[in-house]
Image (cartoon, coloured by chain):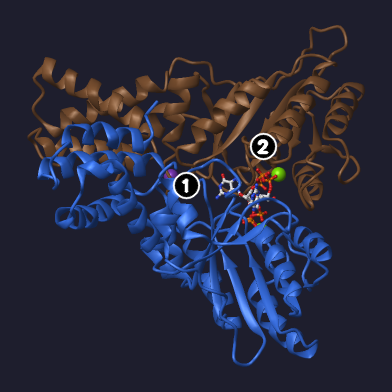
Chain colours: A blue, B brown
Amino acid sequence: MFDTLSDRLTGIFAKLKGKGRLTDADIDATAREIRLALLEADVALPVVKAFIARLKERARGADVHAALNPAQQVIKIVHEELVNVLGGEARRLQFAKHPPTVIMLAGLQGSGKTTLAGKLARHLKGLGHQPLLVACDLQRPNAVNQLQVLGGRAGVEVYAPQPGNGVGDPVQVARDSIEHARRTMRDIVIVDTAGRLGIDAEMMRQAANIRDAVQPDEVIFVIDAMVGQDAVATAEAFRDGVGITGVVLSKLDGDARGGAALSVREVTGSPILFASTGEKLEDFDVFHPDRMASRILGM
Amino acid sequence: LSRDKLDDDTWDEVEDTLITADVGVEATREIVGKLREQARVQGTATAADLRAMLASQLLAALDPGMDRGLKATPHRDSADGRPAVVLVVGVNGAGKTTTCGKIARVLIADGHSVVLGAADTFRAAAADQLATWGSRVGAEVVRGPEGGDPAAVAFDAVKRGTESGVDTVLIDTAGRLQNKVGLMDELGKVKRVVSRQGPVDETLLILDATTGQNGLEQARVFTEVVDVTGVVLTKLDGTAKGGIVIAVQRKLGIPVKLVGLGEGPDDLAPFEPAAFVDALLAE
Ligand SMILES: Nc1nc2c(ncn2[C@@H]2O[C@H](COP(=O)(O)OP(=O)(O)OP(=O)(O)O)[C@@H](O)[C@H]2O)c(=O)[nH]1
Ligand SMILES: Nc1nc2c(ncn2[C@@H]2O[C@H](COP(=O)(O)OP(=O)(O)OP(=O)(O)O)[C@@H](O)[C@H]2O)c(=O)[nH]1
Ligand SMILES: [K+]
Ligand SMILES: [Mg+2]
Ligand SMILES: [Mg+2]
């Protein structure tokens, strides 16, 4: 297998002793190694290319002191750039001026939406809010029951007027849920939706209709940290099809390097709000760009 | 691959095609290396030749001669008429439960009888989801108490299947990430306990086609723990190409047997290496 990026860069810079500045050849060799490291971490190719171009630009002007371990210096630059792209400081959820605040979840099948709905409900309830969970996945077998179980665990009401399993209109449920939330004095509405493929035009239209029915303050795109090169196509499809205000990366408790974080962030321009880190409702954390950068670089 | 001369850009394009299909850096370099050698030896000049050569390299990497049949038919010759046992494993959300339903559908359509074992006692409403599939396709579902011992449910499902003389028992298990040692041990136990009634015939790893390089690690660890005999590549109806299975086949020799092409009961198909390669190379 491949050495760590640090080892590889150290190899390149071994020849650098004494020189103060990187030659173009040094920069190219370094860029190649970083490119490989990013691709191995599943960062999407177009994103890698753009990132490397920026990095080369920055490296050209950089004063690298051979005496100070140039490999570490370059890694520091790469790390900083990654943290920048990943969003610098974390952003909080946007709340509506006039409650209820509506949070809609969207993403591919199996990405972790329903679980995240439960986590958000629990988290927000813990902050003193009165959330309502809304069951708008009326398609996947027993998605409604799954949300009801999670709502029960979070101690949060689940609005589920339709049984699902192909029965009921998700757009109608979404619309009615807002009225229900007002009536029952809920200040946050969390709308779980069915998983859908970016290329499924009909399902993307349904998502847009749900969005129009609830006028969300946040549309959160949930993406699995294990996703590979498809992250770009999928993020673009959801960005264009539903609109995205924030991203949650799920299954970060696994050992995938999680390059998708960089891809999605670059494509959507939306901040990564949270990290989902397990199957239990408490396995939930704010997103840390610096940790993510280290993880992508295998540090 | 539109140009007719093999310059550096053409080779870069080949590499990019493979990388963006999730084939991975290592496998891509090896495949491109072989291709360059072949092009040099044959003096190939056109991009059209190159595409054909690339397709055959990829096909070779998938070992098209391998047996991809599902070992899901019963042991009619054995003394106790034991059903075939299929164990379905994989990471969270990959498509295990759906694939159990779809396989049951195919078997039942072929005139077989099926028992489904709901050995995911952990995830919210997982057994209900399998039960819905059971009634959709006409298979009995054996389930246990929520939070109960999954190995016990799996054992009971096989016992029930044997007693009622069905042809196949499909065991759905909870999703687990391969780096969770405790959960992987639990899965190993499920298989051991089931095996007390006879060997498991097929252990299918469900791999989501959108998975990147972590897919290889999934295949490696699940194989270490439960000896995976086949892969089902799900969600191939999306834009993802599923190229990680090339690395899985190369490194571990585990063949893809089936592909998932949607959420419906009939959205399952045999894996066709040539069609897969064509789709991988398509724009
Ligand atoms: N390990 C781990 N598992 C997770 C995480 N988030 C969700 N899961 C699991 O992933 C699987 C899918 O999660 P769901 O919440 O059902 O995903 P979904 O996006 O709602 O799926 P669909 O509704 O079918 O599209 C379940 O087994 C969850 O328990 C996470 O952060 N870590
Ligand atoms: N488009 C598409 N969706 C699929 C396919 N297979 C499964 N799904 C969907 O993916 C999601 C997850 O499928 P499940 O069968 O619940 O996955 P699982 O592996 O059992 O999930 P856990 O038990 O939670 O780990 C569901 O929304 C399924 O409908 C497929 O081949 N194509
Ligand atoms: K595809
Ligand atoms: Mg869901
Ligand atoms: Mg399941």
Task: Tell me whether marks 1 and 2 sit on the same chain.
Answer: no
Q: Position of residue A246 (x, y in %)?
A: 50, 69
Disc sitting over residue A295 in the figure: 1
Q: Position of residue B72 (x, y in %)?
A: 69, 22
Q: Position of residue A283 (x, y in %)?
A: 68, 55
A13 shown above or below B264: above
**Which chain is home to disc 1?**
A
Q: Is mark 2 within 8 Å of ligand 1?
A: yes
A150 shown above or below B166: below
- Hey, which residue is sitting farthest bottom in the picture? A98
Name the image quarter holding residue A121.
bottom right
Residue of label 2 = B180
- Amino acid type of the residue tagged 2 in the rendering: Lys
The reply, left or right, for residue A220 in relation to residue B195 is: left
Q: Position of residue A145 (x, y in %)?
A: 79, 59
**Which chain is home to disc 2?**
B
